[in-house]
Amino acid sequence: MMITKLWKDRDFIGGCSLCLVSLFIMQQSLTMSFTEHPGTLSPRFFPLMISIVLLGLSIRVLIEPFLKKQSKDAPENQSDNYKLIVVMMLCMFVYIVLLKYAGFFVSTIAYLIFLMQVLKATSLLKSVLLSFIITGLIFIIFSNLFEVILPTGYWFGG
Amino acid sequence: MKILVEFLTLILSFILDPSYLLVIVAGVVLGIAFGAMPGLTAPMGLAILLPITYVFDPTKGLGMLMGLYCGAVYGGAIPAILINIPGTPSAMMTAVEGYAMSKKGEAGKAIGIATIGSFVGGVVSVLFLILIAPWLGKMALKFGPPEFFAVGVFGLSIIAGVTGKSLYRGIIAALIGLFVTVIGMDPIDSTQRFTYGNVNLLTGFSFVPMMVGLFGFREFLLQVGKGQFEYKKVQRITNVFPSIRELRNNIVTMLRGSVIGTFIGSLPGAGGPIAAFISYDSTKRISKEKEEFGKGTIRGIAASESANNAVTGGALIPLLTLGIPGDAAVAIILGALMMHDLRPGPMLFQQHGDTVTGLYVSLFLANLILLVVGMFGAKAFVRILKVPLNVLLPVIVVLCVVGSYAVNNNMFDVVVMVMFGFLGYLMSKINIPVVPMVLGIVLGPTIEQNLRASLLLSRGDWHIFFTRPISLTVLLLTIVMLAWPYFKKFLFSKS
């Protein structure tokens, strides 16, 4: 019961992740290969120090749920729509891949329409219209005014 | 005197060149839009605009960012007055008085006094910046690597201490930021650290994608997670111009707020919200009409807005002289300076005096433009609040992607932007603030390089940091700053 409760606590999960990250940095710093220069610090000194302090503080985060219990602090319960966050992240990765293959114009229009529909911004027709206008404006501003070469996509010979 | 003559000559040349004025106007307008939309922030606007300014020369690019910075701080007052939601944390006290005035049908007057207060605050802070920064810069010429190391650690610790819910979480964020700067080639002997054979990582992560991710994409995820895209009904505004008598009655309040704001702004980590609160509180204390506060008095708005806009000039003092950014927005401006090969610190005044004077002029003109745009465009800015956030957010994300890509024409930077945005989102969810992380990223190279250079100087003797008076004093101050919250807790629990 206690373990299940702990795994639902953000601090506990965050503390565990931070501990793992700091241990990883520590291990990588210790096994780093470099040329010795007498009279100065080695390149591994700085990351090693960071990992040691980070480990100590991560443990402090890890034990936070136990301290909360003592001080009767209510855990924060701002529940986000995590499903939507996952969808947004997946959508972003698909967009990045699409940018490479379909280029800026096609992929941005598709991405904007999808996003506006998922976020229930406006009707499908308006979303399509807005996406075309916004993509066109961004394309004109960045390509012509700022001379940025936006991806044309492999499928279109880019 | 010489600097004032240079300043006035440059103002004239800027006014005569419409392209300079145009970029500052664009910056101010965009800034007001970012500040006015709850959910969009000044650092977000600066981060998105950062890659765009790269195409301009440093003076124009920095002019645009100065405009955006001032505009965004001021813009926060608009939703604070009209819908009781501060667009930026600095407008917190403005909301108290502004919304109360709004309900009485005086929203226009509240916006007018906020605009004039912001203008006075901004201009006074520029004057302080012009007078103090070169003097402090000359003093900093005496600094060597140990002093710069100490100042870097001090800057980082003070900011870690004042942001977020607890000191140790701020330090965790700063450490994550410091670690990010370790990735890539070592600055002394080019040893590859944490690169794993990836050529994109040899020079470390680019600054712009990291900032765009942390302030653009992270904010997008936070807003989407919350799922609130609509605001309350926007109040109507009528006459924006206050009467001469009202102006005369509030000028001292504005000047006092400006001095408070400049001073608080020059302290790293303190920032706009604290300045606005102190100015509001001190005005209330000495006011003969204390009971009017909280019910909608223009004096409260004048105090709050003059102070939070004065922070803009104040925050640039430690940035330009010592390379210490006071908050996230200024950290992005530091990134912009570095993008243009301008390294803040004492040498900046010696080697790039023209650019520094250009920056002063841009900040001054930005405030002047803000006054004109604010007074005459207030009704137009109200319309921004009518744009639903779920229409605006997709556009922001696309701008984040294009902005990150534009820096090096490289898709790797887009991936970096997304990764940092997601990392920032996760950090926010476990109450680890991102601002100290940004400062870790900005100050990391200074701290590591100066630490190693100091030890090279002393042949590995750590006493170098404690035998030089400036570095010793700054390090002692760091310890005091870090210990203060615990000491204060102990002291109050005893009493």
Image (cartoon, rainbow, N blue to C red):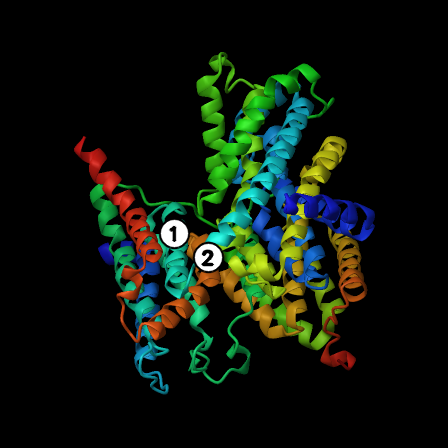
Q: Which residue is mark 1?
A: B160
Choose between A90 and B193: the one closer to the eye. Answer: B193
Screen quadrant of the C terminus of chain B:
top left
Q: Which mark is residue A147?
A: none
Q: Residue at x 75, y 75 (%)?
A: A152
- Residue at 52 percent across and 33 percent down: it is B259
In the image, residue B266 lies at what x, y percent? 48, 44
Numbered circles on residues, count: 2
Q: Is residue B215 left or right of residue A99?
A: left
Q: Where is residue B73, by image quadrant?
A: top right
| Kind of residue indicated by mark 2 | Leu
Residue pointed to by mark 2: B439
**Which chain's residue wears label 2?**
B
- Residue B348 location, x and y as percent? 57, 59
Residue drawn at the location 29% of the way across and 74% of the way down: B460
Please say whether residue B54 is visible from this viewpoint: yes
Element class at badge 2: helix
Which of the two discs, 2 and 1, labels the residue nearer the N terminus? 1
Q: What is the CA distance from the residue labelled 2 to the residue labelled 1? A: 9 Å
Q: Nearer the viewer, residue B477 or B381?
A: B477
Residue contact between numbered discs 2 and 1, judged by CB atoms under 8 Å: yes
> Percent position (x, y) of residue A22?
32, 69
Mark 1: few/some/many CA within 10 Å (<14, 14-19, 20+): many
Residue B308 position, x and y percent, is: 54, 36
